[in-house]
Amino acid sequence: MPQLPTGASARRLVNAVQKLERNLATAGLPRFVARLPVCWLSWHYCRLLDQKIARIKRIRGKFDRWGPAICEASPVAREKKEMLDLDHSMRTDIEFTKSTMMELRDYCEDIGRLFDQLGYDSAGLKKRQAAFLEMLDASCASATRMQEALTRHDDAVLALLRAEADAAVAHAARA
């Protein structure tokens, strides 16, 4: 999937679209025809946001399913001392996913600035951007809940293991 422009690439895109619009206008085309490149660009980003919303929604669904599954499995796993994330790799992966989603948030906001610079206002694009940002926020919240469930589970299992180790040490000292 193509990357959304940020920073310098967004400025280059704005400049290129503005130049194309000026060239079309100076060629004698009516303003609405000269604005077609901006309209097409808006349409393109609407399609791109629709795809990204669908992908983030699937990711959120996974977090929404996995978090409660961890909580449900946690008591049994505690008893068996299973499912420890000692190296925090699961939480690190989740954190990486959240930081990627925050980068996508920045891209989305950058797109809004891009169209503002072009003087173009699209209700459809704004609606999709709002839906995308809402989905990102909900996904990050769900991911955070999953990280917290993992932490609670690991803390409980480690406390159990420490208590068992302490009991073994106390038993060995008495013997």
Image (cartoon, helix red, strand yellow):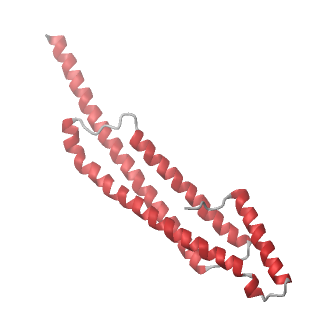
Could you say where residue 90 lies in the image, as x and y percent from the top left?
A: 39, 43
Total marks drawn? 0
Could you say where residue 121 lies in the image, as x and y percent from the top left?
A: 66, 78
Could you say where residue 133 lies in the image, as x and y percent from the top left?
A: 52, 65
60 over 174 or under it: above or below:
below
Residue 131 or 2: which is nearer the viewer?
Answer: 2
65 over 123 or under it: above or below:
above
The residue that appears at 78% across and 89% down in the rendered structure is 30
Residue 137 or 65: which is nearer the viewer?
Answer: 65
Residue 152: image quadrant is top left
* Relative to 82, 123 lies left or right: right
The residue that appears at 70% across and 62% down in the rendered structure is 10
Could you say where residue 14 lies in the image, as x and y percent from the top left?
A: 74, 68
The residue that appears at 51% across and 56% down in the rendered structure is 101
* Relative to 56, 6 lies left or right: right
The residue that appears at 73% across and 81% down in the rendered structure is 35
Q: Quadrant of the C terminus?
A: top left
Residue 162: image quadrant is top left
Residue 5: image quadrant is bottom right
Q: In which quarter of the image is the N terminus?
A: bottom right
Which residue in the rendered view is the most extreme toward the right?
26
* Relative to 79, 152 lies left or right: right
Which residue in the rendered view is the most extreme toward the bottom?
30
* Relative to 173, 155 lies left or right: right
